Image: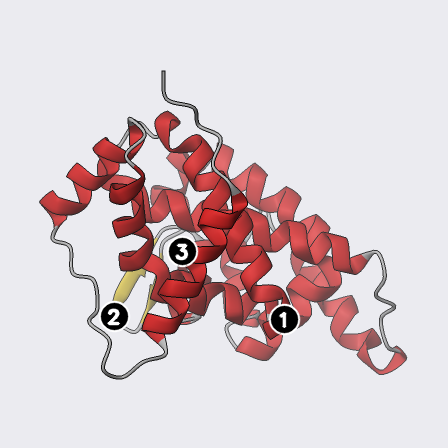
Amino acid sequence: MFSLCMPNLLLKSCIFICGSASNSNSAEVMQLNADECRQAVEKSKYGDLDSFGKLVQYYYPVLHRYVACRVGDAAEVDDVLQEILLLAWLNINKLRNTNAFKVWLMCIANNCCNKWYISKALFDVPAEDDALTSLECLRVLDRWEDSPRILVENYMSREGRSILFRRYSHPVWKLERYGQRWDEKLPNANRISINGEEYIHWYDCLSDIAF
């Protein structure tokens, strides 16, 4: 029987190859249509490492941009990416909807970035000049249940998102988990239009504009 344990060395090699390709102007970009992507996901669920590698190569540019935007520290990006890919590989057999691989992968990325922020927050001491901004962050978080829209409108900028996640990553992590449990209520309660495109959850907005 196939073992879901995957050596970290393979993931590191995969990250190195994908990263080198994404930084090269002459490199051929992996192309997958919807059917090919679905087939690759199905094969990956049964332990096909080559198929999983194709998925990694295809989604790596978007994944890398997201992690780099969230983490910011170039020295830490590869470590976070490695954790994301390892978790994706170990849990891909649990993915029920093969058409939702990208969303599923980005959720793992989001959780890993939040975990990274939480670990860093233990050593961070907020600067005094950030007091007013930090207070506003808390006020927005306090109004989460009533008005998720406020969180989007106040933290649309990259600077605002960085402040929010850097200073209050743990509360945001809790709120995201709360929000995910109530996704069935969001389509009717919290529709947000940005640049002509409609979203149903503030996380979708932040993820999209971060790229």
User: Secondary structure under badge 1?
Assistant: helix
Q: Nearer the viewer, mark 1 or mark 2?
A: 1
In this rendering, the answer to whether 129 lies above or below 95 is: below
Residue type pointed to by label 1: Ala
Residue 75 numbered tag: 1
The quadrant of the image that shows the C terminus is bottom left
| Position above or below: 83 against 195 | above
Q: Which secondary structure lies at badge 3?
A: helix
Would residue 62 be visible to someone looking at this image?
A: no
The tag earlier along the polypeptide, 1 or 2, is: 1
Task: Compare residues 171 and 19 and report the one nearer the observer.
Answer: 19
In the rendered structure, find residue 121 and report the number of the disc placed on it: none
Q: Quadrant of the N terminus?
A: top left
Asked if residue 155 shows in the view, the reply is: yes
**In the figure, residue 138 lies in which quadrant?**
bottom right
Within the image, what quadrant is residue 18 found in? bottom left
Q: Residues within 10 Å of mark 1 (few under 14, many from 20)?
A: few
At x 11%, y 53%, the residue is: 33
Q: Residue at x 57, y 56 (%)?
A: 80
Mark 2 is surrounded, within 10 Å at the Cα level, by few (under 14), some (14 to 19) or many (20 or more) other residues, namely few
Q: What x and y, as percent, mark residue 180?
A: 49, 38
The mark found on residue 196 in the picture is 2
> Which residue is labeled 3 in the image?
14
Q: Is residue 83 left or right of residue 119?
A: left
CB atoms of marks 1 and 2 within 8 Å: no
Q: How far separated are the C-alphas under marks 1 and 2?
A: 36 Å
Q: Nearer the viewer, residue 150 or 9?
A: 9
Badge 2 or badge 3: first in the primary sequence: 3
